[in-house]
Amino acid sequence: MNKIGVDTNIFIYTLDKSSQHHLKCDSFLKDTSNDLFTTTKNISEYFAVCSKLGIDKEKVIGFYNEIKSNITILYPSNESLKTFELLIDNYQPKGNRVYDVEIVSILATNKVSKIATVNIDDFKNISEIELIDLDNYK
């Protein structure tokens, strides 16, 4: 079974049925051949984006409950913090890219070496993670 991290944008596009990315993101999340993981950072980003977009609170909470039921949520640890520090030193990210490095540090520490995303630019220069571009998935 493939261990794959799930980026925040997949959750947002799955929730937004009007998005051009909705079907592929929804299908990806329902693909039982993958063992899916996300991080607490992705969860906080999910809530931040949904609140910024004004998505109905009950819809946001309902989908969050689905995420918790179907995807393993990974937490930061002392080891992931050390990895984060090394990645910060190596890549010197700026602005929101710091969050992407934190996500990679948590995934990598938990032996998840792939991340699925619709926006590959967020991770394309981080060699510690293999990208799965949902625009080209299956």
Image (tube, rainbow, N blue to C red):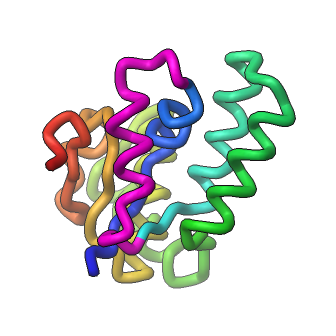
- Taking 132 as reference, is 22 left or right? right
The x and y percentages for residue 16 are 56, 25
Vertical comparison of 65 with 17: above or below: below
The segment highlighted magenta reads 17-35
Q: Residue at x 42, y 35 (%)?
A: 94
Vertical comparison of 64 with 73: above or below: above
The x and y percentages for residue 129 are 25, 62
Question: Which quadrant of the view contains residue 31?
Answer: bottom left
- Taking 133 as reference, is 52 left or right? right
Q: Residue at x 63, y 40 (%)?
A: 46
The x and y percentages for residue 127 are 17, 59
Does the stretch in magenta take in 18?
Answer: yes
- Taking 55 as reference, is 98 left or right? left
In-front residue for pair 107/38: 38
Does the stretch in magenta take in 25?
Answer: yes
The x and y percentages for residue 99 are 50, 46
Count of number-bearing discs: 0
- Taking 26 as reference, is 69 left or right? right
In-front residue for pair 113/78: 113
Q: Residue at x 31, y 33 (%)?
A: 119
Image quarter hosting the N terminus: bottom left
In-front residue for pair 90/67: 67
Q: Residue furthest right?
A: 58
Vertical comparison of 97 with 1: above or below: above
Q: Residue at x 77, y 46 (%)?
A: 62
